[in-house]
Amino acid sequence: MSLHTQLQGREAEGKPIRIGLIGAGKFGSMYLAQIPRTPGVHLVAIADLSPDAARRNLERVGWQAARTQARSVDEALRTRGTWITDDWQAVTRDPNIDIVVECTGHPVAAVEHCLDAFAQGKHVVNVTVEADAFCGPLLARRAQQAGVVYSLAFGDQPALICDLVDWARTCGFPVVAAGRGHKWLPHFSESTPETVWDNYGLTPEQARRGGLNPKMFNSFLDGSKPSIESAAVANATGLGVPSDGLLYPPASVEDIPYVTRPRSEGGLLERKGMVEVVSSLEADGRRIPYDIRMGVWVTVEAETEYIKNCFEEYNAHTDPSGRYFTLYKRWHLIGLEVGMSVASVALRREPTGVATCWNADVVATAKRDLAAGEMLDGEGGYTVWGKLLPAERSMRIGGVPLGLAHDVKLVRAVKKGQCLTWEDVAMDKGTPAFRLRSELEQMFRPGVG
């Protein structure tokens, strides 16, 4: 039975999926815009550091003020309204809420929110993929131990890539490569919130109109977010990662099967079975026609002459050998698609992407020469960007994950382009996020297990 049919059934029975949302910013607002149009779901509560800002965002996406006047979860349940609070534990700990959608974008806080929700027997759809990138395997294990489902968020590119990989493998195709698109030139790794809009392709006026956060959008531009999302995909699918960071080969949609082949066959991959990000810009900055900047893709291989002939007979666009074929989705709708995860988790108890291994890590890397005593400002800021590395290499160098490189003081100088290590920083070791990361590293140390 389709998810939509099941949702209609829940609506008819008066038993909607009861949702709590933590964080009503841009991504959360996009999901909020779809909730009134989706049967069988009830947003019972929103937790946000600024309830007034959450109300303004609700108004922006078309919610009527009368729907958000509930003063408690109980009142929200009676009136089919929504309670807004600044107390996130009121959301994770209320027994009337089935699923928590973690949407803060703050990785350290997100880990705490997820763990608390698991402890209360609640499923979690985690939009804050930054948290998944540095401790996703243990978040998944904690959820399993609690008997609940932990999931990446559909609409965000990692879950969409995982869906394509699952399609390929379920159909019997070996996955050669999978990933997303991105607007990329090497110097973007130095971008700051002051330079982001010119490079991103928006005017400051457009950014203000959309309520866009320059630091958050800079995390996309400087390569941090593509690395984070690629790490989440690698850890969820078992695909490998490049040994020294993403390559960002420039390619149109039609060229993806050409460049996402192994080097031994004319492509750019170190080997088959890798994540990668395709750039929508040529090396000289020219835009590539029919790019996949906002989309996702998977490249598969025809292992037999018969399958290769089928590609040819049905006009599938392949590389010159006829063996490599790319299926793609050129757009993603971000928070507008989160309902797929909520329904899948609640109705099928199936995640739309979840970490199953630790193949990849994203290490904080200096954007410029940094001096001892400086404070790191995390993803999208002025000091560091995130570099995708194999988890084994990150462990070997003692790399600081980008998700923990916020409000942290440097204890010694670091050169531009250098990956930060634990010995470079004065880390707060008391957070649940740090403890979970430390446990993950201990599990994967050579000779452990």
Image (cartoon, grey):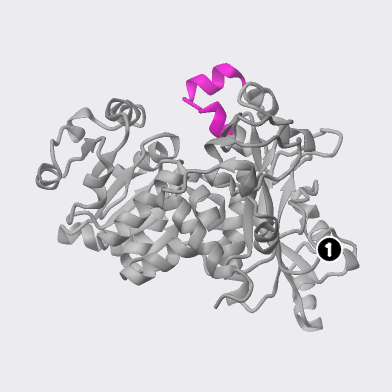
Q: Which image quadrant is residue 232 in? A: bottom right
Rendered residue at 76%/69% (across/down): 272
| Residue bearing mark 1 | 319
Q: Is residue 188 magenta?
A: no
Q: Quadrant of the C terminus?
A: bottom right
Q: Could you tell me residue 69's position as x and y percent?
A: 16, 32
Instruction: Name above or below for residue 369 compared with residue 232.
Output: above
Left or right, 243 with reference to 350: right
Q: Could you tell me residue 144's position as x and y percent?
A: 38, 70
Instruction: Name above or below for residue 209 compared with residue 257.
Output: above
Q: Secondary structure at mark 1?
A: loop
Instruction: Name above or below for residue 29 compared with residue 113.
Output: above
Residue 330 seen: no
* Magenta extent: 203-217
Left or right, 127 with reference to 320: left
Residue sitting nearer the eye, 322 or 359: 359
Residue sitting nearer the eye, 346 or 306: 346
